[in-house]
Amino acid sequence: MKSAPHHNYKSLYQECTRQNAGKDNVIVMLQQQLMQLVNERQSLHQRLDEQQGKIANQQLELEQQQQMIIGQAEKLAQQQTIIQEQNTLITAQQKELDKNKQELFWFNGLRYQLKEIKKMMYGIRSEKRHQPTQPGNPVAGDQLVLDMNADTWGVCQITSRRKITEHLRVVTSTTPKKCGGRHDFPSGLEEQIIILQPADKPVNAKCIGHVDQRQLACDPMRWYIKVIRRLVYLVPSDDQLNHKQLIEPLPPHPIPKCKMDISVLVLLTIDKYRYHLPVWRQQQRLRQYNIELPYSTLCSLVNRSCEALEPLWHLLLKEIMVSRLINMDETTYRVLDNTKRRGKKSHIGWMWAAMNPIQGIVCFLYQPGRGKKDILSVLQGYKGHLMTDAYGAYKKYGKQPGVTHLNCLSHARRLFMYALNHDAARASYALDNFFGPLYGIEQQCKLLQLDYDAITDKRQAESLPILHDLKKWLLAQLPKTIGRTPINKAIAYTLNNYTALVRYTEDGMLPIDNNQLEGQIRAIALGRHNHLFAGSHRGGKLAAIIYSFIATCKLQNIDPAKWLDDVLRRIPNQPENKLFELLPQFWKPMHQSKARSA
């Protein structure tokens, strides 16, 4: 058996002591760490408790905030509902506002139309503008102002006075005292002298003169039977076996075998188309003289008288077409149309008017419509100057080669006159500062009796700058106006047709407007208000014929009745190549034959 190994217990003890000391140190260190961990755990528990408290508080706050959010969401939903209701209300109010705006605009238009209708019914139709004359050079057509200081010239002083001795003045005069009206009677009238003797005249009385009282008198129309007695002769032949009857032919008459003298035809035609007396009223007037003529007979006499003038009317229309200056306008003319269905037998036709203001000739043309085709026979192929309004039917013919298209300045001015009741400030400014001076220049040319070249120079120097300023003003004012209002229409119309409106300044021969032609159309309007309509489309054409010659006679300073009487007697035997001599502008009265004076 082996012996136990020898150990050094001291070193082992020391070693163990060291190990135990190290372990103790480790235990101490671990205890310290444990204490530290315990402390940290306690602090963590405390922090956890604090965090849990905070979390609880935050959860409570979150719950409160959630409740607030729910309340806010409910309020927001209520607000959205209110907003939607407000939006619906605003939309409805906006629609109502737009509707009220449209109704207000419509009401303003009605109020403007009412003013225009009242003006047409009760007011004056004149388009003249009256404005106070400014100090300075007088303008043609304006009334002169007497500039006199009443305080200076109206003061007088009486330095002395004396009494005038009373006396009796005896005035003797051999000139009879003039009695009666303030104007003389027309010269050339037949005088019928009626002598009145005093009832108690003594035998020895001596006549020393007379006192006349002049009165205008008249007799009713004198109707009589005109008997043309033609003597019939038998002229024997040379052989005394045969005889030849010799009789003077009847005087020429436009209506063969007519029982009415030409004087009756002239009376009926002139009364209807110059004095606008319907045939029915003429029939009533004839009955006062125990002359009973059927209505159809009177209408036939008037129509056939117009038919006799139709060849002359074609010559008059041709004269205007080759004149190279035409003013054109149109107006309505109602006719009866039996081709339409029952209940609508009337048709609104159109009376087209063409005039040459230089030659003083007018021609009317009746057409059933108002389109481009209705004036094809007049303006197709025409070359020259064409003055019209801005109606679209004229634009096609105004663009033909060789045609210079002008627009009537009076139509533009008239729109500003219509706008006075709507926008007085702008309308008055345009009328007084542009249109007034332009027409004042034209009146000066007439007063000074300038020739065409001088008128052209004056227009270029004075009228053209005014027209340029007018365009600038119109361009500046157009955006400031409301669409479809009278002032907006006036400005837009003038701007759209500005080029054609200023062309009259290029030649002094050209008129500034169509007013002279509109004055001739007035006769048709007056007749339209009296005899209302023509019996047919053919009747409208016949009316255009006689209206043409009556208007031309007026421009030529000729009595239409005298012209018509002479022409109806001459036209049956007038050679075709000399027919133009009967036109009013070339007409010269011819001495009547013995048959006419019988």
Image (tube, rainbow, N blue to C red):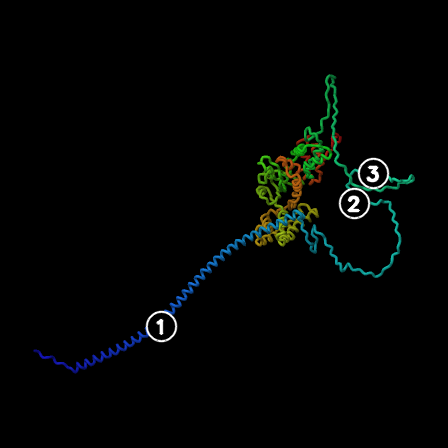
What kind of element bears circle 3?
Answer: loop
Q: Residues within 10 Å of mark 1 (few under 14, many from 20)?
A: few
Q: Which disc, if any, is residue 526?
A: none
Q: Which residue is mark 2?
A: 181
Residue at 71% across, 38% down: 559
Instruction: Compare marks 1 and 3 and give the one earlier in the sequence.
Output: 1
Q: Is residue 39 left or right of residue 472?
A: left
Q: Which residue is mark 1?
A: 50
Residue at 83% across, 61% down: 159
Q: Is residue 111 left or right of residue 3?
A: right
Q: Which disc, if any, is residue 194?
A: 3
In this view, the residue in front, 217 or 445, is 217
What kind of element bears circle 1?
Answer: helix
Residue 387 lies, in percent from the top left, at 62, 43
Residue 128 lies, in percent from the top left, at 67, 49
Cβ atoms under marks 3 and 2 closer than 8 Å: no
